[in-house]
Image (cartoon, coloured by chain):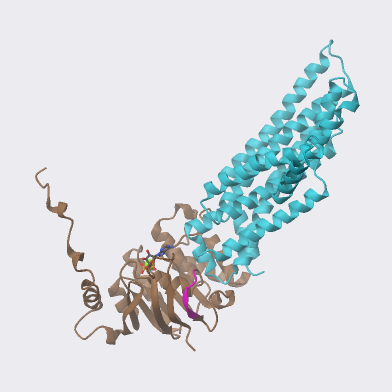
Amino acid sequence: MNGTAAVARYTLLELSRRRVLLVFFLVGSLGIVGLGVGLRILYSLFESNPNGGFNPVTNQFVELQFVSLIRSALGTFGLLIAYGIGMTAIYHDLDSGAATSIFSKPVSRFAFSVGKILAGVAALVVIVGLLAVEARLVMLLFGGGYEDAITEEVLATVANTLVVMLIVLALSTWMNNIVAAVVAFVYYNVITGVMTLLHSFVNSNLIENGVARAVIDVAYWLFPHPLTSSIPAALVRAQVQAGGQSGQSSGPAAAVLQGSGPGDIAWWAFVMVFFAAVVYYSVRRRQV
Amino acid sequence: MAVVSVKDLRKRYRAGDPWAVDGVTFELEAGEAFGLLGPNGAGKTSVVKMIAGLIHPDVGSISLFGSHPGNPAARAQLGFAPEDPDFPKFLRASEILDYFASLLGLDEAERKRRIPETLAFAGLDAERRQIRQFSKGMKQRLGIAQAILGRPKLLILDEPTADLDPLGRRDVRALIERLKQSGVAILLNSHLLSEVELVCDTVAIMGKGRVLKEGTMEEVVPEGRNLEDVFVELFQAASPKRDQLPSFIDEGQSR
Ligand SMILES: Nc1ncnc2c1ncn2[C@@H]1O[C@H](COP(=O)(O)OP(=O)(O)O)[C@@H](O)[C@H]1O
Ligand SMILES: [Mg+2]
């Protein structure tokens, strides 16, 4: 498409000059290294404690703790970066009047929207990907065994932050970008959080009322919801094991926190396409 | 065939608002310089934005090089210098021009040739800062530069000299003359009447969305008068209180 590459290229150049994204990235990467090294030191202290003694479960447990912390660090910084990109990539052009010069050029609004979305996606994947590679390297400090889990976690995080970025991008073409961020935040972090939790209750038969189950099921599939990896479930299992209980009793708790299945992933893809279409629709309608 | 022709154009921004543009019709031929005049809020900017495909008319039709302004191909030969231009603020002037040259479909060799010359014309060749550090006048220069980059057949200039220094104004005047001679059609929005008088062949004077007077410069401006006289006469009747100053202006000299 004529112009898509130019729009994407110069949007990326702009994003690379935005100090706020650089700060999020630096704080995020320092945080991950700090977490890893700190936990490793704690772990060494624990290991050298004559009373505690060494056992393979604790090793695993510490690594899982690390994975869990990394998970929230990646998720948090991924989200911050998603907001940073979503709030500015299109909004600045529309708000400043730059769009007036751009849209009078022989470029279609479709090509413009595609270029903007591609740039946002590329920037987000690269930044979160770098943080993830760093996390993976830091994991070499530990025994290992959860590499696959972190890969899965990174994919889930990237997937979720992409949805958030697109939602903010789409909303920012309709409203002020700060309002857009607040709406997206409330929607994605509060409403979907409650829905995902309720849905997991349904899955694990904690809610037995048939009507309630149906309503929750429908709501869950009606709205975008975050993908989850199997890490939370593994963490619960490991915690239960470390607590010395039988493996049997971890069953229900782990089931509550099971990872996303193919259905969720297909739904995610649909949500991405849907919000990309919303971006195009509002850019097309936009009078500048 | 006319470069651009608009017929009975109407536009309002919100239902219930008065018409910002209320039935405007005109045509522009190659090599013609057309001045669209009128007081602030007359609807000049709305007219040119519709021609550039930036906003949609509610009523009426526009033919831009025989096509619809919403069609990107129709805009390939359009140069548009917006009123109060702005650009992606973390880019530099040369990057903006490279960006826009790509949108215009200019190849590498052509970009290498045109961009430095265009920057030099705009007096921005030595400027290394990003747009966010530009003054209004610098942005206006860049706005004109990006409009001529594609060597358009129709150049729309919306208040192009509002923020320019006298030298910049003279450059724009020379630019318009040269382009006109080479067959480019010019649509100039301005309320700097002496300037319009110098460069335009035909004018239309707008007020409240309507064309109140139009024709060649000779038709609109009688012998021995100038454009300003015509303009003031036209609008003074409509707003007789325009000369009244706020009453407090003459108060409190002693304090
Ligand atoms: N984006 C907008 N939203 C609402 N009203 C607008 C907008 N742009 C212009 N108008 C209104 O349309 C009328 C014509 O404005 P404009 O075309 O900018 O006039 P001019 O360029 O002659 O000064 C004015 O009354 C103005 O208030
Ligand atoms: Mg105007």
Q: In this rendering, would A48 be left or right of B74?
A: right
Total residue callouts: 0
Q: Nearer the viewer, residue B169 or B6?
A: B6
Whether residue A127 is visible here, answered yes or no, is yes
- A255 above or below A249? below
The chain in brown: B
Q: In this rendering, would B148 be left or right of B245?
A: right
The stretch in magenta equals: B55-62
* Quadrant in which the N terminus of chain A appears: bottom right
Q: Residue A201: image x %, image y %?
A: 77, 36
- B254 above or below B209? above
Whether residue A16 is visible here, answered yes or no, is no
Q: Nearer the viewer, residue A263 or B203?
A: A263
- Residue drawn at the location 63% of the way across and 51% of the way down: A167
The image quarter containing residue A248 is top right
Chain A display color: cyan
Ligand 2 is located in which of the four quadrants?
Answer: bottom left
- Residue drawn at the location 59% of the way across and 40% of the way down: A23
